[in-house]
Image (cartoon, coloured by chain):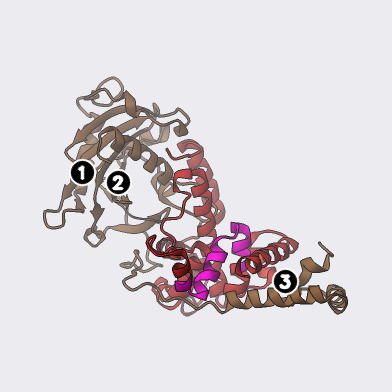
Amino acid sequence: MLEVTGSFRAFHRDRAMASDRARPRRSGARRRGRPAELVPTWEDVAREHGSFIYTVAYRLTGSRDDAQDLVQEVLLRVRRGLETYKPGSMHGWLARITTNAFLDDVRRRKRRPADALPEDPDWVLPPSMAADEALSHRSLPDEVQKAITDLPEDYRVAVVYSDVVGMSYQEISDALGVPIGTVRSRIHRGRDRLRTALS
Amino acid sequence: MSTEPRDLLSAYIDGELDPDEVALVEAHLAEQPGLREELDALWRTRQLVRDLPLLPLPEGFRPIPRSRSPLSPAPTRRRIGARSLLAGAVATLMVWGLLLSVDPVGEAVVRPDLASVVGSHISVLGEGNSTSSGVSEMPMDTEAITAPEYMDGDFRLMYAEKKGDMAQAMYSDGIRRISLFEQRGRIDWHSMPEDGEMMMIDGATAWHGAIRGYDVLLTERRGMVYVLVGSGTSESAMEEMTSQMPGADTSVWHRLIGFCGRTVDFFGLG
């Protein structure tokens, strides 16, 4: 049984409020006179930044299947929100969308315990393989990825923002809506756990 | 903000400390060899993450909303009639329906017959042959699939029927009516009508369009195909339901999958 809260009425009410706040207007950018040539098309984003989105998604999820699902969700959100994009911040913008989509999914899974277990994480090797042999087959990137995947989501997102996307603490603070001291703490604790896991 | 030097090491590595904090950390580093080792270990850890490669998109990956420009206007939606508008002003009426035909070539692929979907929806509503509740007589005892509690008790089952490989159920909260249908299989997304739009709902591919004035949504997940038909909706009710805006931490998908899972279990189709 899936655990879901709220009702259709509450859902619609909340959604309407969220839409009033956040929904980009389809032709707003052009009406506001933004030069069309500075705003990439959705196809441009998918073609030129798909690999970046997938990389961030995979670092967050640790699963190729989940990462592909996340990329699809991100591209849909990109499609809806492309007009809000400010030229020059594409990777930061995409990373924020990817992380928001990831965190939304994490929250959903927490409400749905049956889905909480990862589905065949990519680092899991066939059970017939001996443990020592399995370890020898794991590459260093696999080990690092597993350590990242094992981090609590808050730490994982902070580390990925910082060390995969390359965002500054201030940018991460803005993206997550948390104080910069919290960003600093999450990054440090995340790295410290990685250090322990990889030592 | 912490002034414990150990807690500042990552920010020190990243160049994110102010001058006073840098001086504090460096003073402690000069005095504590252990702290220096810790700093080096953190730096190596950071480098391991930073050295992870950029990953190519998996071969064969195709973005779903591929057939439309991102800046193209929304597909034209048929306007609902005055009678439905009036009803919609009082209450939002939503009905979900499904009529899928099995592709004889690919046994796992199902192809939606959307005209029949809407026809089924009208039929189930019981127009011209309805009970006092406005819904056709329930064809069987379906207490076992009454609406789940997470609908806040608003919804109860009004109708349920097994139609071949499909399970169909209609729920109502006294105002709205929701019919849910599902079938095992998958969808050939290339065959979807052009006058709709592709979208994602909670990571699941979906198609959304308007047929005979009814909103229709088709989606699939984990080997199950689901179709939604909404009628007499307010202008944006269905769109709101199917949207997944950043910041919205829930969506209709949770309710849909919960409903359908219950129904398909009841009919032994799962």
Label 1: chain? B
Mark 2: amino acid = Tyr
Q: Which range of residues does the magenta coloring cover?
A: A136-159
How would you rate the neighbour count of disc 2 (Cα within 10 Å): few for under 14, some for 14-19, many for 20 or more? Answer: many
The residue at 51%/59% (across/down) is: A102
Colour of the chain lettered B: brown
Label 2: chain? B
Q: Position of residue A101 (x, y in %)?
A: 50, 58
Which is more N-terminal, label 1 or label 3? 3
Label 2 close to label 1 by CB (< 8 Å): no
Q: Position of residue B183 (x, y in %)?
A: 24, 44
Tell me the CA gap for discs 2 and 1: 10 Å
| Whether residue B205 is situated above or below residue B145 in the rendered picture | below
The residue at 33%/58% (across/down) is: B197
Mark 1: amino acid = Leu
Looking at the rendered image, the disc whose residue lies closer to the viewer, 3 or 1, is 3
Q: Residue furthest left?
A: B104
Apparent side of residue A98 relative to residue B242 in the rendered image (left or right): right
| Whether residue B224 is situated above or below residue A153 in the rendered picture | above
Q: On the rendered image, what quadrant is the N terminus of chain B found in? A: bottom right
Q: Position of residue B34 (x, y in %)?
A: 80, 73
Label 3 close to label 1 by CB (< 8 Å): no
The residue at 28%/28% (across/down) is: B159
Q: Residue furthest top?
A: B132
Residue on which disc 3 sits: B10
The residue at 69%/69% (across/down) is: A169
User: Which numbered marker is on residue B99?
Assistant: 1
Colour of the chain lettered A: red
User: Which numbered marker is on residue A149?
Assistant: none
Secondary structure of the residue carrying numbered label 3: helix
User: Which numbered marker is on residue B226?
Assistant: 2
